[in-house]
Amino acid sequence: MKWQKKGLIIKPQKRLWWMQTHAFVPTIYHLKGSVYRVYFSGRDNKGISHIGYAEVDFNNPYEVLEYSLEPVLSIGDLGCFDDNGVTPSCVVDHKDKTYMYYIGWNKTSKVRMSLVTGLAVSDDRGKSFKRFSKAPLLRRTNSEPYNIVTGPSVMIDNSIWRMWYVSCLGWVNEDLPMYNVKYAESNDGINWERKGQVCIDFQSLDEHSIARPFVIKEHEKYKMWYSYKGSDYRIGYAESLDGINWERMDDQVGIDVSKDDFDSIMIEFPNVFKSNDKYYMIYSGNNYGIEGVGLAVADI
């Protein structure tokens, strides 16, 4: 694909307490026709992330139809895995419910952060969410003992729930974790079997982070966009015939940083969908989306 950048479409709204800065990790949810709800994290005046949304008609993406006045999901109880911030990762409809898989932020005693997957459920097509549990959905295990098990992309594929998620391999130092992308399966979207199957791994010694995969299935082929980082994030791309064994094809992703714009230093956290006979990508830019959510378009 060759992506054409269209600039920022969602920007922080100072009038809303929950998004004084940033609009990052955009997560798409289809409403009707060309109208989509874009969930994302804004940061309040203390730098804490909350999940809200902007509704966008992608026939005219520069005029946001609606911002949520309040977060649809805010921080968890003190001492819980998500008591220092929440960030969306993936939204899935199932029967009459809407599942939001999200990232819970938590301070820890030595390393700078803990990022663990939680689940929130909506009964009103995503206008509001309630936690499925105060405990995380993906817990640490002996084979995955570190405090980053997060950033999932989930789809229901022939009655099987499939998940591609970020898994920490260890910490280089207190500020630098190493993580790649692994695979899990479920029968209900809640209880997940994790065998440690690596999907996307590092391709050079310069890489230490592969983050927030996003997967679609098209013509019996799985396509994944993700972020990879040495010094700064870039967007990568991979394909698979079974959803488990992947070929990295970063040279074919068709998008990179700009020369002088909101995404001139880093570009990351892509979410891709089809509408109006085109592919749309929403993504974050410099400083983890401090200026907002960008849009790029490619022909089918």
Image: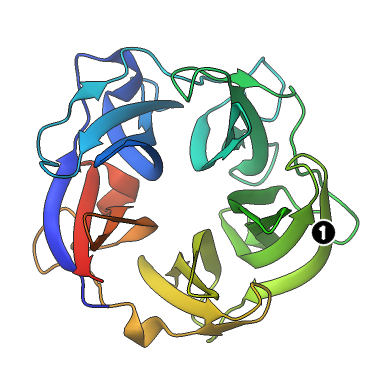
| Left or right, 46 with reference to 153 | left
Q: Tell me what residue is drawn at x 78 percent, y 42 percent.
A: 188
> Which colouring convention does the figure follow?
rainbow
Note whether 104 is above or below 232 in the view shown: above
Note whether 201 is above or below 261 in the view shown: below
Who is closer to the viewer here, 26 or 34? 34
Q: Tell me what residue is drawn at x 66 percent, y 77 percent.
A: 242
Note whether 209 is above or below 144 in the view shown: below
Residue 1, quarter of the rendered image: bottom left
| Left or right, 27 with reference to 198 | left
Who is closer to the viewer here, 139 or 173? 139
Q: Secondary structure at mark 1?
A: strand
Identify the image quadrant of the C terminus.
Answer: bottom left
Who is closer to the viewer here, 262 or 32? 32
Q: Tell me what residue is drawn at x 81 percent, y 58 percent.
A: 144
Task: Report if residue 227 is visible in the image.
Answer: yes
Task: Report if residue 101 is visible in the image.
Answer: no
| Residue 113 x, y percent position in the rendering | 60, 42
Residue that badge 1 annotates: 194
Label 1 neighbour load within 10 Å: few <14, some 14-19, many 20+: some
| Residue 57 x, y percent position in the rendering | 19, 37
| Residue 209 x, y percent position in the rendering | 53, 66
Say what amino acid the circle numbered 1 marks. Answer: Arg
Residue 93, quarter of the rendered image: top right
| Residue 174 x, y percent position in the rendering | 62, 53
Q: Tell me what residue is drawn at x 39 percent, y 34 percent.
A: 39
